[in-house]
Image (cartoon, rainbow, N blue to C red):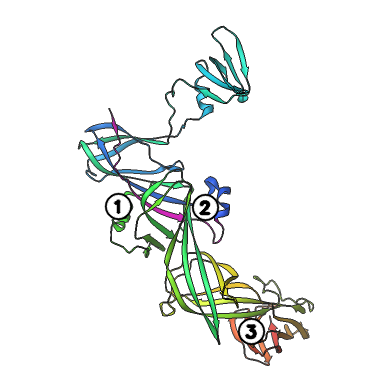
């Protein structure tokens, strides 16, 4: 016997959306290019009232996403979980379209409409063929006509086996007859989310502060709409096997239980295994083929930050040294660039301190007339609390310089290279500037600074920083000698 799925007046939707997009990879302008390859997916939980009959019965459920992964479907009765089980599941996706209807109606009667000037002509007959867009009909008189262009085809009825929506069909064995509170859960492609951050930067004497706002964009191209859904977002690299397994029942119960807890209106962050879960404290509509933007957290005002100008001109260190770089001319003379960076601490003491999902950071600053102007953007990876973020904004216009080799000596017997370097940085601004001259020690992994005119900070195994203060329209030099030994 077949039983019917009786939907509640308002389905109880809960969605957990996962993103596999790289920071800054997806934008609203490029969504149409992705289609089913949208980098992300969602775990959908749909709570319904359904009428079940005692014993075995067939239950049809049509309100599923077109991009559902049927291997992840789980059905459970919350009214009688021990006495209700699914013994068989079928996923029907042979959706009706014109070509399938024509294929089914070969040998049967149809009516074709043709526009001839201002007149709509109807031709009826038995469909003999529908290949390559051309219809061949045989009229009642026996005459056979070939119709290459037509405006419409009229079919007497919808043939069996074709459906208008993807449908899950379960063979359910239930001990308790009547209305059941049920939950259907599944994974679907065609959904993703990403973060965008906006910074308003203010420079002041000796430093800067900023306002940081964070938004999330949720995209639904799954082929289903979710009115008044509870939304949750997972930030982190969640591994997926090539063939996904069905979603565990017990895990879904625990996640739904957490969703029922009272929450604030905005997103609330919590831990989920080794990831972070962001739960929206109110329900929200998520229509199919829609893009929704929501505030991730309230704007953090007047957070402290530091602007950095970093001069680099030396070659990058090798990731693997097979032998010392003994070519005297390698990196001997270079004009450098001065990168402009913004650095800030993601700490509560700095009015932040929230795990930040990967995303794009855009920075604006007020111009002389008070209007906000865009000054640069960068992407960040998933960043936990109490970490320092460094955003590259661009290249400084008024600070320039060069790097040159002053002396070079190689002693193959002692296995040493002595090289002296001079770095010159000029500040053409009308105000003083603090610049970090960054030097990469690229010839060999073993090195010692044997002479220097300024103190430096060792940044890592192959990088040293020389902080220098340059007056307005002035210049400063850094000289040092390094000995490489292998």
Residue lying at the far top in this picture: please name it. Answer: 141
Q: Are marks 1 and 3 in contact (CB under 8 Å)?
A: no
| Mark found first going from the N terminus, 1 or 2 | 2
The range drawn in magenta is: 2-27
Alpha carbon distance from label 1 to label 3:
56 Å
Mark 3 lies on a secondary structure that is strand
Residue holding disc 1: 253
Can you see residue 479? no
277 above or below 209? Answer: above
Query: Which quadrant of the structure image shows residue 64?
Result: top left
Mark linked to residue 435: 3
Q: Residue at x 68, y 74 (%)?
A: 316
Q: Residue at x 59, y 71 (%)?
A: 373
Q: Are marks 1 and 2 in contact (CB under 8 Å)?
A: no
Mark 1 lies on a secondary structure that is helix
Question: Which one is in front, 430 or 1?
Answer: 430
| Mark found first going from the N terminus, 1 or 3 | 1
Can you see residue 76? yes
Q: Residues within 10 Å of mark 3 (few under 14, many from 20)?
A: many
Alpha carbon distance from label 2 to label 3:
40 Å
Residue holding disc 2: 39
17 in magenta: yes
């Amino acid at each position: 016997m077949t039983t019917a799925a009786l939907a509640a007046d308002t389905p109880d939707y809960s969605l957990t959306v996962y993103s596999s997009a790289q920071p800054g990879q997806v934008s609203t302008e490029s969504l149409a290019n992705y289609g089913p390859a949208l980098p992300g997916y969602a775990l959908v939980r749909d709570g319904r009232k359904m009428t079940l009959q005692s014993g075995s019965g067939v239950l049809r459920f049509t309100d599923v996403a077109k991009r559902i992964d049927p291997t992840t479907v789980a059905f459970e009765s919350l009214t009688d979980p021990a006495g209700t089980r699914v013994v068989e599941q079928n996923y029907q996706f042979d959706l009706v379209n014109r070509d399938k209807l024509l294929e089914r109606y070969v040998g049967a009667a149809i009516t074709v409409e043709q526009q001839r000037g201002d007149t709509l002509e109807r031709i009826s007959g038995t469909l003999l063929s529908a290949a390559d867009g051309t219809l061949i009909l045989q009229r009642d008189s026996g005459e056979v006509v070939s119709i290459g262009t037509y405006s419409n085809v009229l079919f007497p009825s919808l043939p069996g086996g074709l459906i208008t929506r993807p449908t899950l069909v379960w063979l359910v064995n239930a001990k308790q007859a009547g209305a059941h509170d049920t939950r259907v859960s599944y994974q679907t492609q065609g959904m993703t989310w990403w973060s965008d951050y906006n910074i308003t930067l203010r420079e002041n004497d000796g430093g800067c502060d900023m306002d940081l706002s964070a938004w999330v964009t949720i995209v639904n191209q799954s082929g289903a709409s979710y009115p008044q859904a509870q939304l949750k977002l997972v930030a982190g690299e969640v591994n997926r096997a090539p063939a996904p397994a069905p979603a565990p029942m017990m895990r879904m119960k625990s996640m739904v239980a957490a969703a029922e807890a009272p929450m604030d209106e905005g997103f609330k962050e919590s831990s989920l295994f080794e990831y972070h879960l962001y739960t929206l404290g109110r329900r929200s509509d998520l229509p199919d083929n829609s893009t929704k933007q929501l505030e991730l957290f309230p704007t953090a005002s007047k957070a402290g930050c530091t602007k950095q100008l970093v001069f680099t001109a030396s070659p990058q260190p090798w990731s693997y040294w097979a032998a010392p770089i003994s070519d005297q001319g390698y990196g001997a003379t270079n004009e450098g660039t001065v990168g402009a960076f913004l650095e800030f601490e993601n700490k509560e003491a700095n009015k932040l301190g929230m795990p930040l999902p990967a995303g794009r950071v855009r920075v604006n600053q007020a111009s002389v007339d008070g209007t906000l102007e865009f000054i640069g953007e960068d992407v960040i990876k998933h960043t936990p609390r109490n970490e320092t973020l460094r955003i590259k904004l661009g290249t400084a216009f008024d600070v320039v310089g060069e790097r040159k080799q002053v002396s070079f000596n190689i002693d193959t017997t002692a296995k040493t290279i002595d090289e002296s370097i001079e770095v010159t940085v000029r500040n053409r601004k009308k105000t003083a500037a603090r610049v970090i001259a960054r030097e990469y020690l690229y010839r060999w992994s073993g090195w010692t600074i044997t002479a220097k005119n300024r103190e430096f900070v060792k940044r890592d195994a192959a990088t040293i920083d020389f902080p220098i203060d340059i007056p307005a329209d002035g210049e400063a030099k850094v000289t040092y000698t390094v000995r490489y030994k292998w």
